[in-house]
Amino acid sequence: MTDALHDVHTATNDVLKGYREMSARAEPEIQTVLARLIAMHEKHAAEHVAELKLLRESVQDDSSIQGTVNKVVVILRDWLTDLDRDVLPAVRDGEEALRNEYGKALQNEQVAANAAVAQMLRAQMDAITTEIARLPKN
């Protein structure tokens, strides 16, 4: 169960790295969207940390190379074009990939057996699904 929770937490941290970089470079027209997503994922990450601490797990290394890749992609895109509404479909893709990580975690038998963790992850996945619906596909 802890591996599944770490995987979700790592994916969340990786998304946050990209969004924070994007927010620093983005046009004003998408700042509200980015602020909303960052706030949601920061809340989720804090909930992951609290649950992992209850399980006596360390969260020091819950990031991956993907977080760095996310930042680099944002920087390169900023060099090539403006970070405006045109990036929102890519943001949607990132949210969908993150939601898939939640789906994998919820399929873990130990997660399913722990009502508190399963409920937390389902609620967070539902919040992500709501945000995905607000983002353009193209």
Image (cartoon, rainbow, N blue to C red):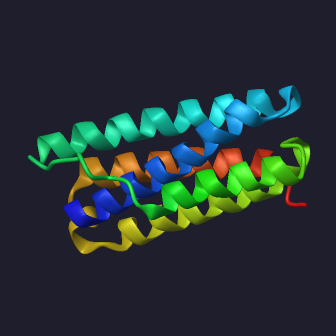
Residue 137 horizontal/vertical position (percent): 85, 60
Check the image and report above or below for 70 versus 124: below
Q: Position of residue 129 (x, y in %)?
A: 63, 52
Residue at (53% x, 45% y) in the render: 17
Front residue of this view, candidates 61 and 47: 61
Asked where in the image residue 127 lies, by quadrant, the reply is top right
- At 60% from the left and 51% from the top, the residue drawn is 71
Asked which quadrant contains residue 44, the reply is top left
Left or right of 52 in this view: 41: right
Q: Find residue 12 and report its horizontal and vertical position in percent.
A: 47, 50
Residue 68 point in image, percent of width and height: 52, 56
Task: Point out the residue furthest to the front here.
Answer: 79
Q: Is residue 104 above or below residue 98?
A: below
- In the rendered structure, the answer to whether residue 33 lies left or right of residue 8 reads right
Count of numbered labels shown in the rendering: 0
> Is 102 placed left or right of 93 in the picture?
left
Is residue 66 in view?
A: yes
The answer to whether any part of residue 1 appears in the image is: no
Q: Residue at x 21, y 57 (%)?
A: 114
Check the picture and name the quadrant holding the N terminus.
Answer: bottom left
